Image: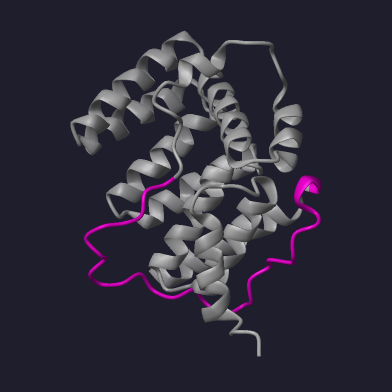
């Protein structure tokens, strides 16, 4: 039953992403009909960290207003890692600021709960945010992250699906999907997800190295 869930979830995620014009140049990522692998009986103690907003995100909320579309265009052509990181942080600032005053207050409490490693409280707070602001993308993404930290990959994938349905360019969610699939042993689709993240954000931290290693495993070394 669980393996069927993962197969369905991954298929739905990639089918949704494939329909997005902004990623039309990426390779075809439709997964095969075979079922995705079952999650390990004993997940590893540590999981890699997901991309997160900068701790001083408020300073990136200031400055001349730019639309997400303009920022994503700038992100693709950023000439240096530093300039790409600056644009990335501006995008995070817009995502975080789109929830409204009540959601923003609750999100600050989510951060406090996470700092205290009280993941259950963080999820309860995020549930409340999603109830009042179902289109607040960053609430879905943050809850996916918390589930990931709890190694509850099934619920994390469900929330990633909600994120990508609302913002297919969310490089954090795409990276998170890749990391989950890698944890589950589905290296082929992990590579696909990471490639989609890099199609949006070519200088995404750590992901290019992960892609290089997966290419060697999935596609083999060039002779």
Instruction: Using residue 115 as the reference point, say whether residue 204 is left or right of it.
Output: right
* Camera-nearest residue between 186 and 91: 91
Hey, which quadrant is residue 32 in on the image?
bottom right
Query: Residue 123 at what x, y percent from top left?
Result: 31, 34
- Taking the spot 38% from the left edge, 74% from the top edge, the residue there is 38
- Taking the spot 68% from the left edge, 58% from the top edge, the residue there is 15
Q: What is the magenta range?
A: 21-50
Assess whether residue 29 is covered by the magenta stretch: yes
- Vertical side of 31 occupied by 128: above or below: above
Query: Residue 160 at what x, y percent from top left?
Result: 51, 47
- Vertical side of 104 occupied by 2: above or below: below
Quadrant (top left, top right, bottom left, bottom right) of the N terminus: bottom left
Query: Residue 116 at what x, y percent from top left?
Result: 18, 31
Instruction: Using residue 67 as the reference point, say whether residue 43 is left or right of it.
Output: left
Query: Residue 46 at what x, y percent from top left?
Result: 26, 57
* Camera-nearest residue between 24 and 206: 206
- Taking the spot 39% from the left edge, 43% from the top edge, the residue there is 145
- Vertical side of 101 occupied by 44: above or below: below
Instruction: Using residue 95 as the reference point, say whether residue 46 is left or right of it.
Output: left
* Camera-nearest residue between 182 and 36: 182
Quadrant (top left, top right, bottom left, bottom right) of the C terminus: bottom right
Prevalent SS, magenta region: loop
Q: Can I make out residue 10 in this image?
A: yes
- Taking the spot 57% from the left edge, 36% from the top edge, the residue there is 82
Q: Can I make out residue 1 in this image?
A: no
Hey, which quadrant is residue 144 in on the image?
top left
């Amino acid at each position: 039953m669980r393996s069927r869930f993962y197969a369905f979830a991954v298929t739905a995620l990639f089918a949704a992403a494939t329909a997005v014009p902004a990623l039309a140049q990426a390779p075809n990522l439709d997964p095969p009909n075979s079922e995705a692998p079952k999650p390990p009986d004993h997940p590893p103690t540590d999981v890699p960290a997901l991309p997160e907003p900068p701790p001083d995100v408020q300073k990136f909320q200031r400055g001349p207003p730019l639309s997400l579309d303009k920022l994503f265009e700038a992100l693709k052509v950023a000439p240096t890692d530093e300039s790409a990181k600056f644009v990335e942080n501006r995008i995070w600032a817009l995502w975080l600021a789109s929830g409204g005053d009540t959601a923003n207050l609750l999100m600050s409490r989510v951060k406090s709960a996470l700092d205290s490693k009280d993941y259950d409280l963080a999820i309860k707070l995020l549930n409340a945010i999603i109830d009042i602001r179902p289109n607040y993308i960053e609430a879905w993404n943050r809850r996916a992250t918390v589930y990931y930290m709890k190694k509850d990959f099934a619920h994390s994938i469900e929330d990633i699906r909600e994120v990508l349905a609302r913002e297919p360019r969310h490089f954090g969610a795409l990276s998170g999907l890749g990391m989950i699939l890698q944890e589950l042993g589905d290296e082929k689709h992990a590579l696909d997800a990471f490639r989609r993240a890099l199609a949006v954000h070519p200088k995404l931290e750590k992901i290019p190295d992960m892609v290089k290693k997966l290419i060697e495993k999935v596609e083999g070394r060039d002779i």
